[in-house]
Image: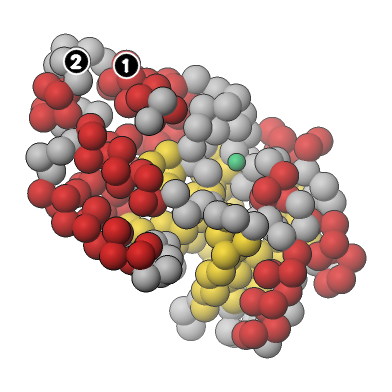
Amino acid sequence: MKPLDIEVFQCRSDNYGVLVHDPETGLTAAIDAPEEQPILDAADRRGWTITHIFTTHHHTDHVEANLALKERYGLEITGPINEAVAIPGLDRTVGDGDEFLFGDHPVRIIETPGHTAGHICYHFPEDKLLFAADTLFALGCGRLLERSAQDMWHSLQKLAALRDETAVYFGHEYTLTNARFALSIDPDNVRLQARARDIETARAEGRFTIPTTIAIEKETNPFLRVNDPAIRRNLLMENRTSEEVFAEIRKRKDNF
Ligand SMILES: [Fe+2]
């Protein structure tokens, strides 16, 4: 099985567009459809014809180009069963644990309620790829717009359980702000300090911070580190539950 080819590009102000291409079958999936023109440009640049959209959740900045791309390519749109009514042009619904093939590449759906009620992530276990959209960001996680902190905490645990080397593609370039916030929660974490320096440089040079990995996030992302003793000490929450510590960190980020 040849490795999948991935093209990442900016859409709107801070969304990432992602195309996943299977060189063996010629299939190409857009992970969400934030904005038509940058997606068309990316496909043209690579000489790919888009055959699928894999929708993660119903927010406009993830589905806005669904119908335009469908009209142009006649492609198939897959999306979360629990948000089906809100996703334009949906052809196929999927839910937690569902599996299908993209060419010969297995894809598994991980439902991650929190940011929205029905948000899903697309996991390619054999390729060690995760498309996490607005659930897990580099050094951050999505805002809790439709579900509780407890729900999001459990969703993030599912992602943290994936193999360390899994490459994580996320939905927004929020990494610089996330790094500054992470340092306010976990200031003595040497790996975080080094990563934050790299991110300051990367963003100053206009470079993307995508993808990250599960291992890197477990070492540096405060939302995955709520059981770290130093973080709990800093928050004066040494005897609280994981969900309570997570909720506190999320609240602080909302006000950062
Ligand atoms: Fe969103």
Where residue 85 sits, quadrant-wise, is top right
Ligand 1's image quarter is top right
Q: Residue at x 58, y 84 (%)?
A: 23
Residue 67 in picture, x, y percent from top left: 85, 57
Three-letter amino acid code at the position of disc 1: Glu
| Identity of the residue drawn at 15% across and 38% down | 187
Above/below status of 1 relative to 151: below
Q: Is residue 94 visible?
A: no
Q: Using residue 220 as the reference point, say whether residue 244 is left or right of it.
A: right
First in residue order: circle 2 vs circle 1: 2
Q: x%, y% of residue 78?
A: 72, 53
Label 1 crowd (10 A; few <14 / some 14-19 / many >=20): some
Q: At 51% across and 27% down in the image, what residue appears?
A: 144
**Which residue: 60% across, 55% down?**
13
Image quarter (top left, top right, bottom left or bottom right) of the C terminus: top left
Looking at the image, what colour scheme do you see? secondary structure
**Amino acid type at mark 2:** Met
| Marker disc for residue 237 | 2
Against 151, residue 30 (above or below) is below
Callout 2: helix, strand or loop?
loop
Residue 205, quarter of the rendered image: bottom left
Q: Which residue is mark 1?
A: 244
Q: Nearer the viewer, residue 66 or 34?
A: 34
Residue 113 in the image, given as x and y percentages of width and height: 54, 31
In the displayed image of the protein, which residue is found farthest to the top?
Answer: 239
Counting from the top left corner in percent of width and height, residue 2 is at 48, 83
Q: Secondary structure at mark 1?
A: helix
Mark number, residue 124:
none
State yes or no: discs 2 and 1 in contact (Cβ < 8 Å): yes
